[in-house]
Image (cartoon, rainbow, N blue to C red):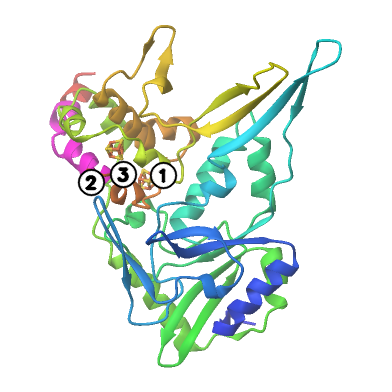
Amino acid sequence: MAQAAIDRAGLDDLFGVLVRRGYTLVGPTVRDRAIMLEELDSTAELPAGWTDVQEGGTYRLARRDDDALFGHNAGPNSWKSFLFPSELRIWTARQSADGGLEVTEDDTPAPRYAFIGVRSCDLHAIDVQDKVFLDGGYVDQDYRRRREGAFIVAVNCGQAAATCFCVSMDTGPKATSGYDLALTEVLDDGGHSFVVEVGSERGAEVLAELTHREAAAAELRAAERAIENAATGQTRSIDTDGIKDLLYRNREHPRWDDVADRCLTCGNCTMVCPTCFCHTVEDVTDLAGEEAERTRLWDSCFTLDHSYIHGGSVHGSTKARYRQWMTHKLATWIDQFGTSGCVGCGRCIAWCPVAIDITEEAAAIRATDLVAEAERNTHADDR
Ligand code: SF4
Ligand code: SF4
């Protein structure tokens, strides 16, 4: 069959098939006046007819004039919450009868998640975290268990939030890899349906169990228009050309002082970022001193403790902490993992309480590059 499509009822079928296959479904739903990713029981919990209005420091829900289920953009939490939980017990230790210590690693089986509605930027973010947790010398076993089990239903965006800039980061808005099934929601006079693309054998098996049909030419055109709309609607961007060297040579740029005057070092940007992976551990013992446990917790590079080494913090000032965060995202991450640490989801812009905008900061540094092009060329000629 050429490209497939499912009707609105087919989405209920998809939920049913995935549940029968043993998956715990996770997808968008309205909670606390935001569209959050939560465990779902049925499609009735999807945010039908809701969208979000986002800007620097602003996130509001608004009603759409249709019943779109995926007519919104990135919300405050990401799939990171399920693949790399904010709190995880790593081991427990108990004093044995002979006074020794028995340490038991926590290998509680992770849920087999089916993620419903993963956007292209977030597929790239998952890929970035795969590099961090799976590809290095140390493999995070809990992440591996969660990641290997996950079934991914991507949804192509049909609109962009004002905070989105995936086009400039080359991470969206169309899902191109990393999914089992990808849907594009189509709402027009012809009804409510989803164009389906298959990205894996598992995806093909699941589609075969659903009532589906060949996508009509008009549906395919509508799907293309929707994705185009999400691309052309983006008003923010980062010029990534040579950005690594730009940030390296502008370590002393006055813009870092400017942003430090505004930054509260609250760490929100790191908590909402789908690629940030910093964590710490906390050890707790019972009062009798017979049992202890170690818990892994999300951490932020905006805390003083994060860079504390023998007597002081490396990043003692707000300026140093913001500079290290942004330079890590856009520059040192490339040296470390071979990819940018930013996928252009815009969450850090919407959820920064003082509306600091990574696209604006990067542009300001580029506009007044301390080592201007002409000067660099002169140095090159001198060599
Ligand atoms: S940039 Fe914004 S969100 Fe990030 S630490 Fe500073 S004030 Fe908080
Ligand atoms: S740095 Fe900001 S825009 Fe980039 S991936 Fe993280 S939260 Fe999204």
Q: Main secondary structure of the magenta part?
A: helix
Residue indicated by mark 3: 240
Amino acid type shown at disc 2: Ala
Q: Position of residue 243 (x, y in %)?
A: 30, 37
The local crowd at label 1, few if under 14, some if 14 to 19, many if 20 or more residues have their Cα within 10 Å, is many
Considering only vertical position in the picture, is 167 above or below 240?
below
Considering only vertical position in the picture, is 77 above or below 251?
below
Quadrant that contains the N terminus: bottom right
Residue indicated by mark 1: 273
Badge number at residue 145: none
Q: Which of marks 2 and 3 precedes in the sequence?
A: 3
Q: Position of residue 44 (x, y in %)?
A: 54, 75
- Do callouts 3 and 2 mark residues in contact (Cβ within 8 Å)? no
Mark 1, ligand 2, within 8 Å: the answer is: yes
Q: Which of marks 2 and 1 precedes in the sequence?
A: 1
Magenta-colored span: 356-377
- Judged left or right of residue 41, residue 314 is left
Mark 2, ligand 1, within 8 Å: the answer is: yes
Seen at 76% across and 27% down, the residue is 104
Q: Quadrant of residue 150?
A: bottom right
Badge number at residue 355: 2
